[in-house]
Amino acid sequence: MAKKKQIISCIDVGTTKIASIMATPGQGGLQVLGVGVTHSKGMHKGLVVNLTEAKESIRNSVKRAEQASGYKMESAYVGVTGRHINSLNKKGVISISRNDRLVRTDDLKRVLQSARTFTIPSDHKLLHVIPRGYAVDGQAGVKNPVGMHGSRLDVETHVITAAVASVQNLVKCVRGANVDIDDLVLEPLASSLAVLREDEKDAGVILADIGGGTTDIAIFKDGSIWHTAIIPVAGYQITRDIAIGLGMPFETAEQIKRKYGSVMTVSDSADDSTVNLNTNGFGVSYQDLTDIIKARVEEIIKLIALELPTNFYKEVPAGLVLTGGCANLRGIAALGNEMLGVPVRIGVPSGIYGLADILPDPTFATGVGLLLWGSNQQEGTQGWKTQGLSESLKRFVVRMRNLVAK
């Protein structure tokens, strides 16, 4: 294989698929060099449940991306999700005691450190500390205080923690595929980079990435992250409902969902009332299928609504952006609008070109977002800086690297 040169790679380890993508910075965005997508095994609701199967799925996905690109994937940005994720908003404050009272880069590090002075459960570690906004001598709304004069610097941050055991299992699987980890990134943060516009973040918007195992939520206000949450209900439950309700194998139910999935009633749809799927000789009523899917999607939307601000009509005027594989269900945007009374659109990832034929699809929002995250971090252009992999997790990654090398 050719020698790696300015390659940015990512691995989206999902419940239903593993997507490995390799790209390089180009004039029109990120030029995709290779994509490797495989069926996910050993994962459930974003968590590793079988190390051997998960490791093999990741290895196969990485191998396909390497074969397509002609480069070796040496390291990658990896997405993290699961019910073990916790988040909260914390404030920090420091004094600027130098004679010139000038805020410097080191002061930003100090004030972020002060925001971390709270008790974290022993089984959790910091994943991200993201500044939401600064205040200099009480003047709020400052995005970048470096170079400003003042004697007091305040910061409000969004802090995200993850269960150590869950992260360790994921790290072990990726390292088992002979890939180092550049950073672990909360998946809804990555997806937001791929599908949200800056004007939406400024106005106030909700992102809901409805994947296979989890529904990942990120709420933005005033251009900054305000709230994140992981709901352990998503596409897997829809497929399971179809399999049980219509009496068919899970794999067949998944095929029917992907091909005919909709929340539209027969009267609203151009489809016939009967769906005939040749695979395994199953045929089902279109009305029965949509009734089952719609009931579960309505539940997911209600769960999303529970994460919203009390007066979300005013707080998030840009509405709801749906992405992830389940965003491809026909009629889901209209259903969301009907239930919540806010604008709803489908988020499709952008900012890429090259071997990216399958990527402009909600299914790959997290994967494309991880690439954009990596590109922004390497170029130092991230709109909101974040603390990456915490020191303890970095040490664990090193231990895994040494263990695998033996």
Image (cartoon, helix red, strand yellow):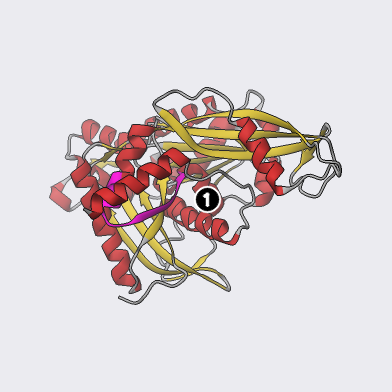
Image x and y of residue 67, in percent: 28, 70
Q: Residues within 10 Å of mark 1 (few under 14, many from 20)?
A: many
Residue 307 visible to an observer of this rendering = yes
Along the line of sight, the residue nearer the viewer: 38 or 156 = 156
Residue at 35 percent of width and 71 percent of height: 71
Residue that lies at the very extreme toward the left in this rendered image: 280
Quarter containing the N terminus:
bottom left
Residue at 59 percent of width and 27 percent of height: 117
Question: Looking at the picture, which amino acid does disc 1 mark?
Answer: Gly
Residue that lies at the very extreme toward the bottom in this rendered image: 2
Magenta-highlighted residues:
172-186
Q: Is residue 404 left or right of residue 330?
A: left
Image x and y of residue 250, in percent: 20, 40
For label 1, the residue is 347
- Let me know if residue 182 is in the magenta part: yes
Which quadrant would residue 23 be assigned to in this image? bottom left
Residue that lies at the very extreme toward the front in this rendered image: 99
Residue at 78 percent of width and 44 percent of height: 103
- Let me know if residue 282 is in the magenta part: no
Which quadrant would residue 219 be assigned to in this image? top right
Image x and y of residue 272, in percent: 33, 48
Q: Is residue 350 left or right of residue 281?
A: right
Residue 227 visible to an observer of this rendering = no
Q: Is residue 96 above or below residue 305?
A: below
SS at mark 1 in the image = loop
Image x and y of residue 118, in percent: 56, 24
Residue at 49 percent of width and 25 percent of height: 120
Q: Is residue 149 left or right of residue 71?
A: right
Q: Is residue 134 left or right of residue 341?
A: right
